[in-house]
Image: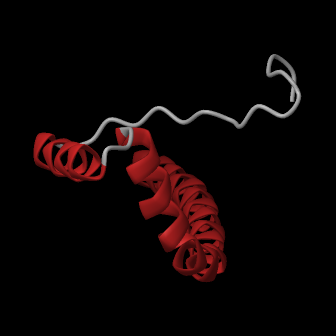
């Protein structure tokens, strides 16, 4: 990846609700570790569940994209039909 020195882990900026921030801070303080270490541990624990959910998210996006395309095509067809109807009514 360009811009990152070899061997350096990628970074992720997160904005979290205040209560979650406070909880992670308390855990980090109690354990004597940085907040980022707690966040990484929590996310690492979630990795198997996230990996299992990934195909579902991808399928959901595919279905959503297909539905949007169908809706757009249907709208175009309806516009053509209405245009023809209005022309006939105007004759």
Residue 82 place in picture, x, y as percent: 47, 56
User: Relative to 87, is 55 on the left or the right?
Assistant: right
Residue 63 place in picture, x, y as percent: 60, 74
Residue 18 place in picture, x, y as percent: 13, 40
7 above or below 48? Answer: above
78 above or below 34? Answer: below
Farthest residue toward the front?
32
What colouring style does the render use?
secondary structure
Residue 46 place in picture, x, y as percent: 49, 72
Front residue of 37 and 20: 37
Residue at 37% over, 43% down: 33
Residue at 88% over, 28% down: 6
39 above or below 67? Answer: above
Res. 10 visible in picture:
yes
Front residue of 10 and 75: 10
Residue at 35% over, 41% down: 35
Residue 74 found in image quarter:
bottom right
Front residue of 76 and 8: 8
Res. 91 visible in picture:
no
């Amino acid at each position: 990846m360009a811009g990152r020195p070899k061997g350096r882990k990628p970074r992720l900026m997160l904005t979290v609700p205040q209560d979650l921030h406070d909880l992670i801070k308390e855990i980090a303080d109690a354990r004597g570790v940085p907040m980022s270490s707690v966040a990484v541990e929590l996310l690492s624990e979630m990795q198997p569940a996230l990996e299992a959910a990934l195909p579902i998210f991808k399928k959901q996006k595919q279905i959503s994209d297909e539905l949007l395309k169908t809706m757009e095509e249907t709208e175009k067809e309806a516009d053509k039909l209405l245009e023809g109807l209005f022309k006939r009514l105007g004759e």
